[in-house]
Image (spheres, grey):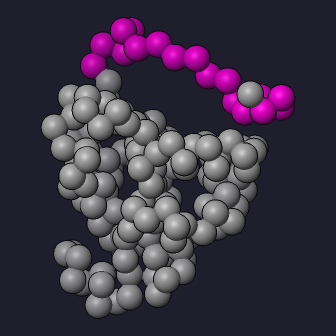
Amino acid sequence: MNDDHFLKKGFSISTDKNLLDFDTIYHYLDQESYWAKGIQPERLQRAIANSICFGVYHKKKQIGFARVITDEATFAYLADVFILGQYRKQGLSKWLMQTIMQHPDLQGLRRWSLATADAHGLYTQFGFTPVNNPERWMHIFNPYPVNNQ
């Protein structure tokens, strides 16, 4: 499906942060996602401020979201991707990913990364694969400390 198909049905995608519906994003991530439950509103506001954000809208109502954390030169991490339940199974996630991968500030990057428990089928369509040599990768995982640091 192409942009025209979705646009004719009243859907749009924008990186304009002024259009984002923070309450919708926060509610989904805090209450419905498996990866961001318990995130503090202030932490999410800071995350949005420091990311390239993609809002998905149906007739100006926010129905999806994704953000990319990047240096816009070598690396990008894809995070917080969702489409609200009642809008799934229409190809919107695929359209969102196409839009993200075609964004002019995200071209020529050496590495993209993401973590998912259940959307491997979507991401493999865009070239994502399991990490080679996972023993080389390290991380610190600190789920939303109470002191809000």
Depth check, front residue: 149 or 132: 149
**Above-or-below relation of 25 to 90:** above
For residue 148, what is the image quadrant? Answer: top right
Residue 145 sits inside the magenta stretch: yes
Single out the residue that lies furthest toward the top.
135
Q: Nearer the viewer, residue 52 or 142?
A: 52
Residue 84, image x, y percentages? 55, 69
- Is the residue 57 above or below the residue 101 in the image? below
Q: Is residue 23 visible?
A: yes
Question: x, y (%) of residue 72?
Answer: 29, 37
Image check: 54 left or right of 34? left
In x, y percent, where is residue 139?
52, 17
Q: Is residue 112 above or below residue 88?
A: above
Q: How far across and down, in percent of the image, does residue 92 sit?
A: 36, 70
Quadrant where the image shows the C terminus: top right
26 vs 100, left or right, is: right
**Does the magenta portion include 134?**
yes
Residue ID at (38%, 88%) = 10
Q: As drawn, which residue projects farthest toward the right?
A: 147
Of residues 118 and 28, the one nearer the viewer is 28
Magenta residues, as a range?
Answer: 132-148
Name the residue located 39 percent from the left edge and 9 percent from the top edge. 135
Q: Is residue 28 visible?
A: no
Residue at the spot 60% in from the left edge and 69% down from the top edge: 21
